[in-house]
Image (cartoon, grey):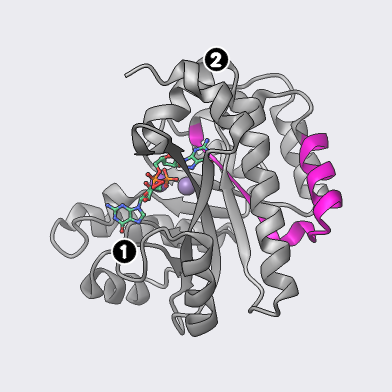
């Protein structure tokens, strides 16, 4: 499978689409946000999942135009939903490592927000632990610039990387997304319950919002509500959906 060659053409021809997965508030199960997830509709190979082409886009550097397209498309969609009078939601996008290192990333995001007329408070950027641990020059400055702009920053896949709790103190982060590997056996494997409870308690005392990922069962949901996890995301509520389906969902459950 040689996807690399097709990637540039795919960007030019607009073969990508964003899907949206609801983020649900535990208290009342209202949809308060969504995560944008990219899909590639390949003309011959059909739908290709991001796991298969994001690494190639990273290697080739095409992640920069592609990543920029994702942020712009997400903000344009958010604007459409706001103009339709749908309940206000926060929309998060995943950043890749190389994209985060892009020196003008802050300017790119600022320009997209200005072009689309989106209030920065509705945009959330999902970072990974490795981006924060890389200790690259300018990381802290970048995070503070985003914060100053009013964009929300969260740590994705929390607990799976080479993590240091020091960065929770050092960096201006607002939310932790507990990786779905800790949610899978909640209520079955006591270690996972202990880890999830401890993460939530720590987040609460640091004033960070916590989101549990990969919630698939009512039992997991009940436990997470007990543990006072503010928000959840997972197949129990909905899989990632195309914009039309998400719009209907938001109309019904927003
Ligand atoms: O549903 P799912 O198959 O969408 O996503 C698989 C992986 O691809 C996840 O780790 C997710 O974070 C990543 N991913 C999805 N969309 C994007 C995107 O727009 N940019 C980046 N960098 N990663 C994405
Ligand atoms: O790495 P990141 O958290 O961005 O990845 C999101 C990935 O998790 C996407 O591939 C998305 O489709 C997937 N996902 C979302 N909800 C669930 C769920 O409830 N169960 C499983 N197994 N995967 C999920
Ligand atoms: Mn994510
Ligand atoms: Na994750």
Of label 1 and label 2, which has the lower sequence position?
2
Alpha-carbon neighbours of circle 2 within 10 Å: few (<14), some, or many (≥20)? some
Q: Nearer the viewer, mark 1 or mark 2?
A: 2
Residue that sits furthest to the front in the current view: 44
Q: Quadrant of residue 12?
A: top right
Q: Looking at the rendered structure, which numbered label has been put on residue 149?
A: none
Q: Is residue 20 above or below residue 12?
A: below
Question: In x, y percent, where is residue 148?
Answer: 82, 48
> Disc 2 beta carbon < 8 A from ligand 1?
no
154 vs 71, nearest the viewer: 71
For image coordinates 47% across by 56% down, the residue present is 202
Q: Quadrant of residue 136?
A: top right
> Disc 1 beta carbon < 8 A from ligand 2?
yes
Q: Is residue 179 above or below residue 167?
A: below
User: Which part of the image, by quadrant, shows the N terminus?
Assistant: top left
Q: Write down the residue under mark 1.
A: 235
Q: Main secondary structure of the magenta part?
A: helix
248 vs 131, nearest the viewer: 248
Question: In x, y percent, where is residue 143?
Answer: 72, 39
| Residue at mark 1 to residue at mark 2: CA–CA distance | 33 Å
For image coordinates 70% across by 46% down, the residue present is 72
Alpha-carbon neighbours of circle 1 within 10 Å: few (<14), some, or many (≥20)? some
Magenta residues span 106-129
Q: Looking at the rendered structure, which numbered label has been put on residue 60?
A: 2
Q: Is residue 108 magenta?
A: yes
């Amino acid at each position: 499978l040689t996807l690399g060659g097709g990637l540039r053409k795919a960007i030019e021809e607009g073969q990508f689409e964003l899907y949206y997965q609801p983020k649900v508030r535990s208290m009342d199960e209202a949809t308060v946000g969504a995560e944008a997830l990219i899909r590639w509709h390949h003309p011959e190979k059909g739908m290709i999942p991001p796991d298969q082409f994001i690494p190639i886009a990273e290697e080739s550097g095409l992640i920069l135009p592609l990543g920029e397209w994702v942020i712009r498309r997400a903000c344009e969609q958010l604007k459409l939903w706001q103009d339709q009078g749908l309940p206000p939601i926060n929309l998060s996008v995943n950043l890749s490592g190389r994209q985060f290192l892009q020196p003008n990333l802050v300017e790119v995001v600022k320009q997209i927000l200005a072009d689309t007329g989106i209030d920065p408070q509705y945009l959330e950027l999902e970072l990974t632990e490795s981006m924060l641990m890389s200790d690259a020059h300018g990381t802290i400055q970048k995070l503070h610039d985003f914060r100053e702009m009013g964009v929300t920053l969260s740590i994705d896949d929390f607990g799976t990387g080479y993590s240091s709790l020091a960065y929770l103190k050092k960096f201006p982060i607002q939310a932790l997304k507990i990786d779905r590997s800790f949610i899978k056996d909640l209520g079955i494997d006591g270690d996972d319950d202990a880890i999830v409870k401890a993460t939530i308690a720590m987040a609460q005392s640091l004033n960070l919002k916590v989101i549990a990922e990969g919630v698939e069962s009512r039992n997991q949901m009940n436990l997470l509500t007990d543990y006072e996890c503010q928000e959840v995301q997972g197949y129990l509520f909905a899989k990632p959906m195309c914009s039309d389906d998400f719009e209907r969902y938001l109309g019904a459950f927003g």
